[in-house]
Amino acid sequence: MLEVRRLSKRFSGIPAVDDVSFCARAGEVTGYLGPNGSGKSTTMKIVTGLMEASSGEVFLDGDPTRKDPIAFRQRMGYVPEEPFLYTHLSGFEYLTMVGKLRGLGAESISHRIEGMLRLLGLSGDRHASISSYSKGMRQKTLLAAALLHNPRLLILDEPFSGLDVGTSLVLRGLMQELAARGRIVLFSSHELETVERVCARVVILHKGKLVANDSIENLRALMSLKDLESIFAQLAVEQDAGALSREFADLLED
């Protein structure tokens, strides 16, 4: 499993993540939720090794990830919130480069890239420059790059951004299929309906602090609420969304 233990991150003394602990287990998809500014993306960056924690530690299968960060990254696939790519390369060239950096053999690289481009509907644009790709096409390329080396741990930060409905449905099913095959999947999204459909359990942050860490079923029962959206609103949203919506509409009519 992936274990985050007493993780904190402070910027100029102000905590963005404050003493957060949770586990993401093999065999299930774990949802990591919170409003903007809650510390979600900061946590993701610390877990992936892109940012240092102020305190606390991250473990994969019992081993601290900082002990051998290169070995850890070899076992991890990551789709970041922002699609940073080498846009002068074609999709095929970019994925080939990623495969080589991951240490895959030429035959495996070719076979997997061909299959992924076909399954993601990118075969026809394989040799086009990524600079000409739409947002959805870039997101598909990032997803293929994260999966190319068959990672033990898959970290997805807003992976549905820009994806069409068909690809979104495939990605939903893929997360569940990978979890069923023993992978660890940590998934952050604002799409609560999708989280509720694919995640076995959820971790919810609010102002950098952990406010929930349980299965969706247990949270529903404990809070006597019917769905994840209601749970999220109760735990992590301070405003009355309905009242704000009415006030916004009233403002337009003034």
Image: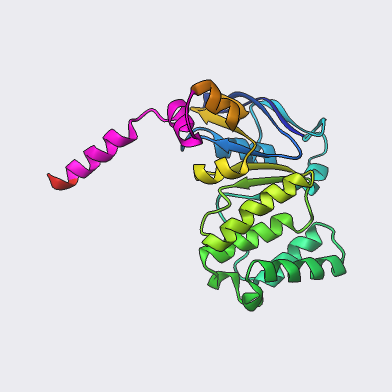
Q: Give how far across and how far down residue 190 sits, in percent.
A: 50, 43
Q: Give how far across and how far down residue 201 sits, in percent.
A: 63, 33
Residue at 59% across / 67% down in the picture? Answer: 87
Q: Give how far across and how far down residue 217 sits, in percent.
A: 59, 30
Camera-side residue: 237 or 49? 237
Q: Name the side, left or right, on which 115 lies relative to 18.
A: right
Q: Measured along the vertical axis of the image, is residue 96 above or below residue 233?
A: below
State whether the magenta stretch is mostly helix, strand or loop.
Answer: helix
Q: Measured along the vertical axis of the image, is residue 229 above or below residue 124?
A: above
Residue farthest along the left direction in this orientation: 254
Q: Give how far across and how far down residue 208 sits, in percent.
A: 53, 27
Asked if the magenta segment contains residue 226, the reply would be yes
Residue 180, image quadrant: top right
Quarter that holds the N terminus? top right
Magenta highlight range: 224-251
Camera-side residue: 65 or 110? 110
